[in-house]
Amino acid sequence: MAKLIDVSDLNIYYGDFLAVEDVTMTIEPRAVTALIGPSGCGKSTFLRSLNRMHEVIPGARVEGKVVMDGQDLYGSDIDPVTVRRQIGMVFQRPNPFPTMSIYENVAAGIKLNAKRMKKSDLDELVERSLRGANLWNEVKDRLNRPGAGLSGGQQQRLCIARAIAIQPDVLLMDEPCSALDPISTLAVEDLIEQLKLEYTIVIVTHNMQQAARVSDKTAFFNLAAVGKPGKVVEIDDTATIFSNPSQKATEDYISGRFG
Amino acid sequence: MTTTATAARGEARREARARAGDRIFKGTSTAAGILILLILAAVAIFLLIQAIPALRAPAEEVMGGEGLLGYIAPLLFGTILSSVIALVIATPLAVGIALFISHYAPRRMAQGLGYAVDLLAAVPSIVYGLWGFTWLAPRLTPLYRWLSDNLGFIPLFAGPASPTGRTMFTAGVVLAVMILPIVTALSREVFLQTPRLHEEAALALGATRWETIRYAVIPYGRSGVVSAAMLGLGRALGETMAVAIVLSATGAVTFNLIGSTNPSTIPANIALTFPEATGLDVSVLIASGLVLFVITFGVNMLARWVVNRRAEFSGAN
């Protein structure tokens, strides 16, 4: 559970285009690391490179090292499928499997891992995951209804339940609240607060208040100009970033002067 | 005050003009919709009126001398049997090809393959008939002999094997090749439309490519594939020339797919019998056409029902 990720000299490409340049950072276990920065600066791209989802896009590739628990995730003997089973992901828009029920959605990851599980154990795991995502009380009477029938905020928490059901070491969240209303956002933020006791969490957000509220560390990404690669400008404790950043660009960004 | 009033009136006028456009568009699209229904009704009424003499005729005057039902039933059996064989062969193959094109093949190869499949659809049915008769049938005879020798205990392959190969099974294979392009093309389109988000959901859970297809692509495309199969079935049910050429029909009702006695199909029978039909015979043939019409209609209804049954799980919301 909850592992440390060491990223060094990571360059991320789309074909020949260098999208993110030279990222080096340490992502602490049992903590929330927030990635902030203007649109197009490569936050999401960087996030997706952590669980090798980046390379799903044709032509996309990565140079450098991402080491988790002493293992280079981009090592030649590493299967990306295995990486993704250890590093869960929640997307910008809720994406429950539309043809599956709430129950099936949560159990989907377990079935994929081809673990044979007794019905009672599976029931228990589904309940635990839904409770973990603060969704159990709302859906316990309709587990066999389609997951797509829930509200947006509930769907997003369903996706979180689905991600934590396979007990990953790390949870990546790509703007998980950007499609949600304030109340659902609050519910998800509370959830993140609880989840960080067990997981390493990396969250991309455009909402700086959110970064300030939920994260322990914040990395500020920026790009020199459109068409230039994004870079990490600064990474520090969230309190420091928001009160006393060392870079002028960071201060300008968080005080709303650009971006 | 006056300026706002004029502005408001100008606004209203613009709105009125927009409404006129709306009305015209609504009118034309409604007319088009009604036209379809009128054509359908016209065909149904024509078939019904022309079939009335056959419906009223005494049994012994109908071709074959066993009444209208006795005449049409074997044909209907043959029609459905050949189409079902075609569907059973073509659907899995088409889904496989479509998945290969949409998710496995390198882009350039996928494109070439897509064109090849579309080209198959452009081949006239009579050409398929000739191919089935002169090329496929003789080459299938050894298979039939083997089937009847080794799997003869299955009623489908009871034999004795047809020496010409012009069997129900051959007809089914030819029909399968004919409906393959349309089922493939439609399946490919729905598979390509799978939302990226659904596929990534599966991938992020640690799904392999095949698992992604099973979890995200196939469930999303299922109703589309059913529709595609039903369209293919519709074409197979109505196919005339290929079956007329390939099948050596004797009118027997049998599940033996590889023998030399085979039921004919409704369209093939109409094509073969119509030129020499007069009077009541024409009416009988049209009555068989009416049956085909109803069956095809039923197949489409069934497809609708299958698709709608799990509508709330379809992902359309």
Image (spheres, coloured by chain):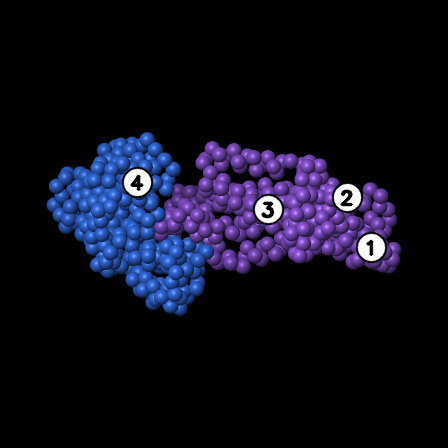
Chain colours: A blue, B purple
Q: Position of residue B286 (x, y in %)?
A: 78, 50
Please identify, in this view, whether the residue under mark 4 or under mark 3 is nearer the observer. Answer: 4
Q: Secondary structure at mark 4?
A: loop
CB under 8 Å between discs 3 and 2: no
Examine the rendering and report whether any part of residue B1 can be seen.
Answer: yes
Tell me the amino acid under the disc marked 4.
Ser
Q: Give me the residue at 30% from left, 46% from top.
A: A51
Subunit ID for the residue under disc 3: B
Numbered tag placed on residue A118 in the rendering:
none
Q: What is the crowding at mark 3: few (fewer than 14 residues within 10 Å), some, or many (at least 20)?
A: many
Q: Which residue is mark 1?
A: B54
Q: Position of residue A180 (x, y in %)?
A: 33, 54
- Give how far apart the Cα atoms at labels 1 and 2 are: 18 Å
Please identify, in this view, whether the residue under mark 3 or under mark 1 is nearer the observer. Answer: 3
Tell me the amino acid under the disc marked 3.
Ala
Q: Secondary structure at mark 2?
A: helix
Asked if badge 4 and badge 3 are on a common chain, one would say no
Quadrant where the C terminus of chain B sits is bottom left
- Give how far apart the Cα atoms at labels 4 and 1 are: 76 Å
Q: Secondary structure at mark 3?
A: helix
Please identify, in this view, whether the residue under mark 1 or under mark 2 is nearer the observer. Answer: 2
Tell me the amino acid under the disc marked 1.
Ala
Identify the mark nearer the N-term, 3 or 2: 3
Q: Give me the residue at 38% from left, 52% from top.
A: A95
Of residue B126 and residue A196, the one placed in the foreground of this image is B126
Numbered tag placed on residue B271 in the rendering:
2
Q: Which residue is mark 3?
A: B90
Q: Quadrant of residue A136?
A: bottom left
Q: Which residue is mark 4?
A: A76
